[in-house]
Amino acid sequence: MSTSVCRAAVISDIHYDATPSSVASRKSEYGAILLRKVVYRLATQIQPDVVIVLGDLVDKPAAPDAEEKLRELKSILDMLKLPVIVIPGNHDPDRAVFNRVFGPLPDYVDVNGTRFVCFDDEERPGYNAHRSAADIARMHAARSGFDGRLVALSHVPLFPAGALPSPYHFINDAEVVAALEMDRYTAAIGGHHHPGSGPSEVRGVTYVGAPAVCESPFPFLLATFGDDVSIARHELKLPSTLSVWDTHVHTQFAYCSENMDVRRTLDIAGMMGLAGVCFTEHSLHLYLDKKALSSRDAYARGLENPLCTRTRAEGYFELLDREQVALSSRGLETDIDFNGKLILDSRDRTRVSLLIGSVHEIPEGMKPRTEPVDTARFIDEFMATSKKLCESGIQILAHPLRMFDRKHLPIPESVIPGLVDMMKTNGVAAEINFHTHNPPVSYVRECIRQSVPLAFGSDAHNLYEVGEFSRHIAVVREVGYEGNMEKVLYRFPDAGVV
Ligand SMILES: [Fe+2]
Ligand SMILES: [Fe+2]
Ligand SMILES: [Fe+2]
């Protein structure tokens, strides 16, 4: 009877490359984005004990930038601050290059009573593998003096003939499987065969072929080793039963953009199974240059600011034209200035289908850090600004409570019913937005109670955020909404928008 449980995230076959793969189903040019999405889910929701990557991190082993690509993937994995085990695959560069980035492959890594034994097997024709006598000896050695769970990791899946439907296998599988059984291995996990297969248990050993994350629906696994083995599959793509737009996405015109790009956003939206995406650039980022935007009076003066120009706003619409973005996917994110006016040039209103409104600044929130915030005044200003926004013709109130997080103030539960009522009265949808924010469950519950439709927004400033709605879906489920989720979602585009 085991006492500890070990939860291992298993990611395989990223096939990252600068250019699209010759195999159309492999989204090689999005390898880093897909990995970043997995890492985000692991960090925010799944929280495994260890992360295992089963090879083929890059697509072209001889590409001049293969090492650079490996380093980029490593920097993403390093964000997790967890033990990470990386096994090389047949698409990865020669081992001198691979080891320069990831270090030499360890014999094994122990995590929570589970010993992950690592193998870099010899390749054989037909994309098969062979385990050397020295490595079979290592399989035995890993059992010596160790009574916990043993899990063998390899790029090519290891299994007794017929146990998994993978066409790729070990040419000496009988010998290797005998070693697994003799040493009472709990499991053997491989990648390489992109559809993935298993789990399949044969004589006490669980065999798993991990699917390729580079192919739709972009899956990865969570293997839980406790008294027994369980394998859960996660997919980056949205459930096919859910038709939802991402109604809050930034572009290269946001000063706070990390890597946004309209063309790539549209690709990712398709890959993730979004029904659509709406670009909603910050209006002030379009009317002011960066220096003027950072000045303390940007929100105080709004459109009255003599530094406002049309140059960047015209550039934004030219970009959307160039990328052939439909009118239904054109929007803006606006604010209310400190005089109560919407920061939206009337010339832009008819050029967009969606207007989302945000409270980014209020006078009390702009006090110097040395002065204490008057909480009562802060709440009054926040509510008054939110009300003005709701009355201004916006369709969605974006991240309605984020101001409190930004100013390091607790979100007062008492404001939630009134805020939701404001949206209801004005026919405004309520956004769920996790970008640097954690919307309270009570807020989502109140929106559903008052029948205020929920708009899913990623507020993407980085491409990995586009359509990343796993937390949005989870919070709606958390409030106990078990029906067809579309019934509580904001229907966008509105009828009549094309
Ligand atoms: Fe592969
Ligand atoms: Fe492979
Ligand atoms: Fe935004």
Image (spheres, rainbow, N blue to C red):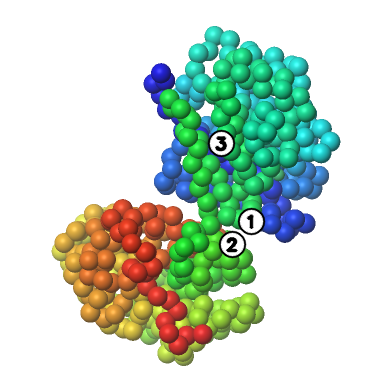
| First in residue order: circle 2 vs circle 1 | 1
Amino acid identity at mark 2: Met
Left or right position of 429 against 382? right
- CB at disc 1 and ligand 1 closer than 8 Å: no
Mark 3: give few (<14), some (14-19) or many (20+) Cα within 10 Å.
many
* Label 3: which secondary element: strand
369 over 328 or under it: above or below: above
182 over 128 or under it: above or below: above
| First in residue order: circle 1 vs circle 3 | 1
Q: Position of residue 76 (x, y in %)?
A: 57, 45
Q: Position of residue 443 (x, y in %)?
A: 26, 61
| First in residue order: circle 3 vs circle 2 | 3
Labels 1 and 3 touching (C-beta < 8 A): no
Q: Camera-side residue: 455 or 390?
A: 455
* Label 2: which secondary element: helix
Quarter of image, res 118: top right
Q: Camera-side residue: 227 or 319?
A: 227
Q: Camera-side residue: 198 or 138?
A: 198
Which image quarter is the N terminus in?
Answer: top left
Q: Which tag is nearer the camera, tag 3 or tag 2?
A: 3
Left or right position of 358 against 172? left
277 over 121 or under it: above or below: below
Q: Position of residue 130 (x, y in %)?
A: 77, 27
Q: Camera-side residue: 417 or 363?
A: 417
Q: CA distance from mark 2 to mark 1?
A: 10 Å
Amino acid identity at mark 3: Pro
Amino acid identity at mark 1: Tyr
Mark sitting on residue 30: 1
Labels 2 and 1 touching (C-beta < 8 A): yes
Q: Which residue is mark 3?
A: 199
Q: CA distance from mark 1 to mark 3?
A: 28 Å
Q: Which residue is mark 2?
A: 271
